[in-house]
Amino acid sequence: MRVATVVGNRPQFVKAAAVSPLLRERHEEILVHTGQHHDEELSDIFFEELALAAPEHRLEIAGGTNSFQLGRMVAELDPLLGRIEPDLVLVYGDTNSTLAGALAAADRGIGVAHVEAGMRSFDRSQPEERNRVLTDQLSALLLCSTASAASQLEREGVPGAVVVVGDVMVDVALALRERALERTDVLERYGVEPGGYVLATAHRPATVDDPLALERLVELLEAVEGPVILPLHPRSLARLEHHHLYARAAAAASLTSPLGYVEFAALLHHARAVLTDSGGVQKEAYIAGVPCVTLRERTEWGETVAAGWNTLVGLDAGAAVAALARTPPAERPPLWGDGDAGRRIVAALEAYAAAA
Ligand code: UDP
């Protein structure tokens, strides 16, 4: 079986790390990096730390509006897939690279397999939600993290085959847990004690693109009892600087460059709580047993909220402070499988290719 995997940004490198090495044990994988995230801090370090094979193809497409980026990616993926002639195209999550891979493959009549299919925030104003819905409609094989995601796809009447495989981020979190726990040197660097700080991330367009939202984010950071460590996504750094809010943010939190997976996981495991607008970080907080306060009105990972470990506060500073003071429940049932999602995905791809 020959699989072309299309990835382009940080969370996709993490997710691919759960599948790619297993796939390569028995099959041919051709990794295509669209270039959406292309620098050392958001890309290269993940390939090194997670032992991902170097991409066979790099498209170097970054910047511009979502539509511009998507259009360029599809235009370049189309002839490339024509040359590679894969049996399947594998895509992850909810970014422009995900949808571009799905569109280009579907147009060539190549089956699309989508990892994290069926997740919904039910907020179509988020580009990620639109990418998820459209990719699922185009996919031949929908690989779900949960049974409720599979039920959602059934309700939407997707034409492809739906398989519940668990969540690949569990595989990676468990595989690197010990390495992360050992890295207490990272806490020393920021002068914090285990359980004595909040780890924050914020990069989604809804949080950082609108100057009023960005100011509310800064006010929220100012209201939270620290210390707060905030590894800044380049997008957020640029917006804070542009709107002259950087100094206030820096007074409210320890701002750092984006961290590699292991250093970030080290800070996450030892944090008192996590404050984030990320999808993946909500999951990782749950897996690590760290309460999460999510800077959004809606989430595609609603089961973490239902379990009492995640609170949605939007950009409401008072609600964030109150949520951070809550004690999490004693129970934390496993939600996304046992760390075996990568193996299940390879098996599902094999079954699909055999039947095709
Ligand atoms: N992450 C990281 N370093 C950081 C911030 C996040 O390694 O400084 C990792 C995090 O552990 C998770 C992934 O990046 O695995 C989440 O990516 P992001 O928040 O960019 O995307 P989303 O999950 O919102 O799509």
Image (tube, rainbow, N blue to C red):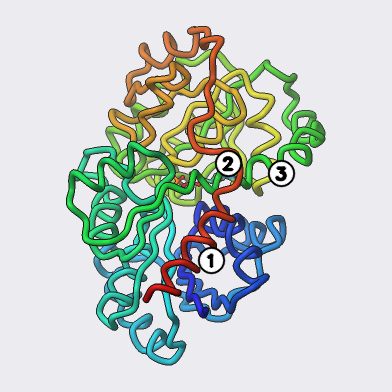
Distance in Å between CA atoms under marks 2 and 3 = 10 Å
Q: Vertically, is 108 above or below 226?
A: below
Residue at 32% over, 26% down: 314
Left or right: 229, with 2 as reference point: right
- State which mark lies toward you, 1 or 3: 3
Residue indicated by mark 1: 38
Above-or-below relation of 45 to 240: below
Question: What secondary structure is marked by label 3?
Answer: helix
Query: What residue type is disc 1 on?
Result: His
Q: In the picture provided, is 66 more to the left or to the right than 62?
A: left
Residue 21's x, y, as percent?
65, 64
- The answer to whether mark 1 and mark 3 are in CB contact below 8 A is no
Sequence-first disc among 2 and 3? 2
Q: Distance of mark 1 from mark 3, alpha carbons?
A: 23 Å
What kind of residue is marked 3? Leu
Label 2 beta carbon less than 8 Å to ligand 1: no
Report the front residue among 228 and 34.
Answer: 34
| Mark toward the start of the polypeptide (2 vs 1) | 1
Q: Residues within 10 Å of mark 1 (few under 14, many from 20)?
A: some
* Residue that badge 3 annotates: 176
Q: Counting residues from the N terminus, which is met first, the one under dot 1 or under dot 3?
A: 1
Residue corresponding to mark 2? 170
Foreground: disc 2 or disc 1: 2
Instruction: Point out residue 107 in the picture as x, y percentages from the top left corner.
Output: 25, 79
Q: Secondary structure at mark 1?
A: loop
Q: Quadrant of the C terminus?
A: bottom left
Q: CA distance from mark 2 to mark 1?
A: 25 Å
